[in-house]
Image (cartoon, helix red, strand yellow):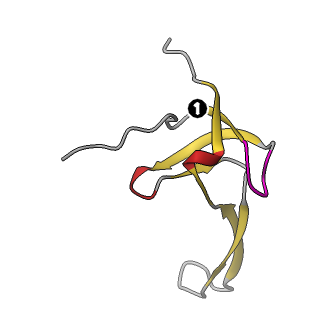
Amino acid sequence: MSRKKTHVRRGDLVEVISGNHRGANGTVRQVLAAKNQVIVEGVRMIKKHEKKSQMNQEGAIIEREGPIHISNVKLIERPSKS
């Protein structure tokens, strides 16, 4: 099984270089290599409607990060291995 090589990894500091969120900075939370997407902390906040459940009696609208195409982010800094 081969793995896709990407220019960013989880924990890297990146900048969004194109799209609606251009200029935003954040750390990579997750890399979705199969879909060529990344989830960047604090960028592209989407609202997710959650159904009523036993855990959540009221139901809710939750804000979380959405994916961005990996070609739209630029690596700024990779954390050092200390």
For the image, the number of numbered tags is 1
Q: Amino acid at mark 1?
A: Asp
Q: Residue at point 18% right, 47% down?
A: 1
Q: Dot 1 corresponds to which residue?
A: 12
| Image position of 43 (left or right of 12) | right
Q: Please identify the residue farthest to the left as the structure is shown.
A: 1
Placement of 72 over or under 50, stated as above or below: above
In-front residue for pair 38/62? 38
| Side (left or right) of 14 relative to 38 | right
Mostly what secondary structure, the magenta segment? Answer: loop
Q: Which residues are magenta?
A: 17-22
Residue 25 position, x and y percent, is 75, 39
Q: Residue at x 67, y 62 (%)?
A: 64
Towards the viewer: 10 or 59: 10
Q: Is residue 48 magenta?
A: no
At label 1, counting other C-alpha atoms closer than 10 Å, the crowd grade (few under 14, some 14-19, many 20 or more) is many
* Above-or-below relation of 24 to 36: above
Q: Residue at x 64, y 35 (%)?
A: 74
Where residue 10 appears, as percent x and y from the top left, is 51, 38
Residue 80 x, y percent position in the rendering? 54, 15
Secondary element at image label 1: loop
| Residue at the (53%, 84%) spot, across then down | 54
Is 18 within the magenta? yes
